[in-house]
């Protein structure tokens, strides 16, 4: 039987002690469990009550939706935001140096803000990057509410969950832009999961009520309701997969 030297054993133990530990806070903020590395996302529309909505529906196909580093920090989120960190673990951003990010006392994402216009060169400014968002959390560390806003638009989101699950059962979004108002209720039916308990298939029913602000004071708005049904699929890789 081969003997392991004291020096080799000590080195192995030292490496294990110094190896970065995965903090699941960020994964949990985005409804995930485990040491998630990458999430790929696909979707397809199954049904729509509006021909116009169906015609303009953009279906993602195997989109790299989210990534996390070996310490569990978000590096790409579902909204296309790229996160980078310096050697001390402090958020930095090469692409949008005006962006700031904050975390609460438990290390959870509290807010991201790229709405500062100081020293901005508007000849090359990408207005789609002008946005901010913030989260509040429930007692189980899951998002309870989220507030998002950009150039002349904004929305407030409220999450509800089934038991202790990290992914939402429903999400209600309320907001609008330039005189247009919307209330959207997202209801999820989860049908498949991976070995870590993260969903890999779900069916979404999206009910949107939209209306313009009436010109006459006291007038009732004309509300249009659209119902869309979507199938969503994703594949998830984990840092521990290679171990």
Image: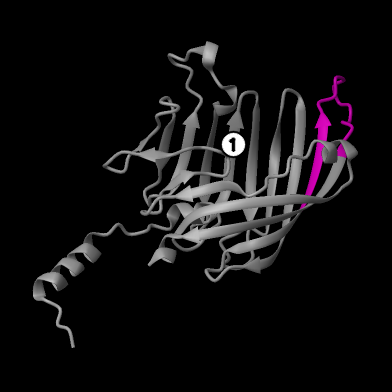
- Is residue 20 inside the magenta stretch? no
Look at 63% across and 62% down and name the residue there. 200
Q: Which residues are magenta?
A: 205-224
The C terminus: image quadrant: bottom left
Task: Give the colouring mode of the picture.
Answer: one colour
> Residue 119's quadrant in the figure?
top left
- Residue at label 1? 148
Look at 48% across and 49% down and name the residue there. 67
Q: Position of residue 206 (x, y in %)?
A: 77, 49
Q: Is residue 140 left or right of residue 176?
A: left
- Is residue 211 inside the magenta stretch? yes
Look at 48% across and 57% down and name the residue there. 141
Front-most of 187 and 192?
192
> Residue 183's quadrant in the figure?
top right
Residue most extreme to the left: 6
* Disc 1 packing (10 Å; few <14; some 14–19; many ≥20): some
Q: Position of residue 189 (x, y in %)?
A: 73, 62
Front-most of 218 and 21?
21
Vertical order, 202 against 129 (above or below): below
């Amino acid at each position: 039987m081969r003997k392991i030297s004291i020096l080799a054993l000590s080195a192995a133990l030292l490496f294990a002690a110094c190896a970065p530990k995965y903090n699941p806070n960020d994964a949990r903020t985005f409804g995930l469990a485990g040491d998630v590395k990458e999430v790929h996302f696909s979707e397809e529309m199954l049904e729509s009550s509006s021909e116009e909505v169906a015609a303009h529906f953009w279906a993602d196909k195997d989109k790299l939706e989210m990534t996390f580093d070996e310490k569990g920090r978000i590096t790409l989120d579902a909204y296309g935001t790229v996160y980078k960190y310096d050697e001390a673990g402090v958020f930095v951003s090469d692409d949008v140096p005006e962006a700031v990010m904050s975390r609460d006392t438990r290390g959870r994402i509290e807010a991201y803000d790229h709405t500062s216009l100081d020293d901005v060169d508007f000849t090359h400014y990408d207005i789609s990057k002008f946005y901010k968002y913030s989260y509040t959390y429930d007692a189980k560390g899951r998002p309870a509410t989220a507030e998002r806003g950009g150039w002349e638009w904004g929305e407030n989101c409220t999450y509800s969950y089934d038991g202790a699950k990290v992914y939402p059962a429903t999400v209600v979004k309320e907001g609008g832009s330039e005189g247009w108002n919307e209330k959207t209720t997202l209801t999820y039916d989860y049908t498949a999961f991976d070995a870590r308990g993260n969903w890999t298939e779900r069916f979404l029913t999206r009910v949107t009520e939209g209306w313009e602000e009436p010109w006459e004071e006291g007038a009732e708005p004309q509300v249009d309701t659209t119902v869309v049904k979507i199938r969503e699929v994703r594949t998830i890789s984990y840092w521990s997969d290679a171990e």
